Amino acid sequence: MFDALAPQPDDPLLALIGLYRADARPGKVDLGVGVYRDETGATPIFRAVKEAERRLVETQPTKAYVGPEGDPVFLERLWDLTAGEAGRGRAVAGLQTPGGSGALRIGGDLLVRLGVKRIWLGMPTWPNHASIFQAAGLEIATYPFFDIPSQSVLFERMVEALSGAAPGDAVLLHASCHNPTGANLSAEQWRAVTDLIAARGLMPLVDIAYQGYGRGLDEDAAGLRMLLAAVPEMLVAVSCSKSFGLYRERTGAIYAACGNADAVPALRSNLAALARVNYSMPPDHGSAIVSTILGDEALKADWMAEIEAMRLRITAIRERLAAGLSRRWQVATAIREQEGMFSLLPLEAADVLKLRAEQAIYMPTSGRINIAGLKTAEVDAVIEKFLSL
Ligand SMILES: Cc1ncc(COP(=O)(O)O)c(C=O)c1O
């Protein structure tokens, strides 16, 4: 039976890593990666994470199972970080998950259990969104979100498309630092989307995977919090991969906020049942680290200082890139207003391949670049290479 399986297409981003590694040219630049990189090109372990790990090694009493729902203290602390004031006192059921991807999958599974048939995804979005929700059994519908040539959010078209969603349909929104475009909704646009979701009775699922990388920890959750305060029911999928640099520890959570506290026990038991049939129990090391950091004032302050420094590095490179590229490409001024690690440049696949072949600049043919893949010292040279196109 195994012989009959057709091989799956390579993940283009993973294939790109292989090509980059095999390139012997000095000065090659990798803008394809999906992880934060510092000035030395490393993806560092946060100081606070190292310290929390040291404490855990010394004090953790057991490695016994945590239970399908995970650690309630972790869930409470992460919810507070994500939802802030809007989440305090709100009836909510949370589940510790293997990363943000696990949170999205359990969220998709829960939607199917609730009888939801369809989820609306903005175009473009992180490609795994469609794969995950399709695998969960949801039908994918799309709304226009971003126009690449003009580098602008297609807000009117987004509203028009979502106005055609049926009550009970789910809508996926990126909290901030949109992947792959870096473009985000303004406060007024969040208000309008909130009103539309409430008026049409849609179920929002907000994906928050880059909190702290855009405008700040609270600012990056402001739209999510506005929505949370206004709608009776909502799902939030949190990833700690970037915010805590815990990529391989698979750390995240899914939360179902509801208007009625009586619904919480059944929600909790359904979330736990979904975990049970997927992977049984979540990994705990990353969650224990996050919980240790968020529960200790000094560690939390150090983590906040480090993520702020990362944010400022990304913002500074964005500004240099926007200023340099807009000398020739007017539209590149938008890169400054965009936020988080990614921007989606208006390049044809042929341009991307030319940059790769002639200038050793690596990015996927979509034109998505990771700003954090650039070192300050090489920004000017990279700008010239782009402008040589
Ligand atoms: C928009 C978005 N959501 C969720 C995730 C999931 O991250 P992870 O499963 O590594 O926590 C990612 C990762 O790249 C992402 O870009």
Image (cartoon, rainbow, N blue to C red):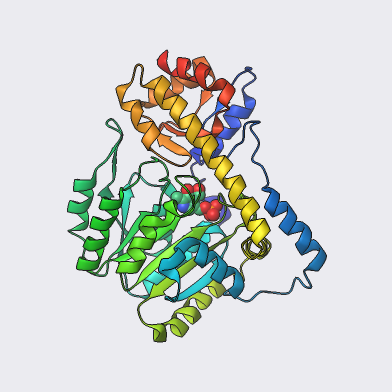
Asked whether residue 208 appears in the rendered view, the answer is yes
Q: Position of residue 163 (x, y in %)?
A: 18, 58
In the visual, does 218 lie left or right of 66? left
- What residue do we see at 40% from left, 41% from top? 182
Q: Position of residue 72 (x, y in %)?
A: 59, 75
Count of numbered circles on the image: 0
**In front of the other: 141 or 228:** 228
**In front of the other: 31 or 258:** 258
* Residue furthest bottom in the image: 262
> Which image quadrant is residue 133 in?
bottom left
Whether residue 169 is situated above or below residue 28 in the rendered picture: below
Q: Position of residue 186 (x, y in %)?
A: 30, 48
- What residue do we see at 61% from left, 49% from top? 245
**In front of the other: 220 or 147:** 220
**In front of the other: 270 or 215:** 215
- What residue do we see at 20% from left, 53% from top? 159
> Which image quadrant is residue 113 in?
bottom left
- Quadrant where the N terminus sits is bottom right
In the visual, does 106 lie left or right of 14? left
Q: Position of residue 23 (x, y in %)?
A: 61, 22
- Quadrant where the C terminus sits is top left
* Residue furthest right in the image: 58
Asked whether residue 108 appears in the rendered view, the answer is no
Whether residue 257 is situated above or below residue 327 in the rendered picture: below
Whether residue 366 is situated above or below residue 95 in the rendered picture: above
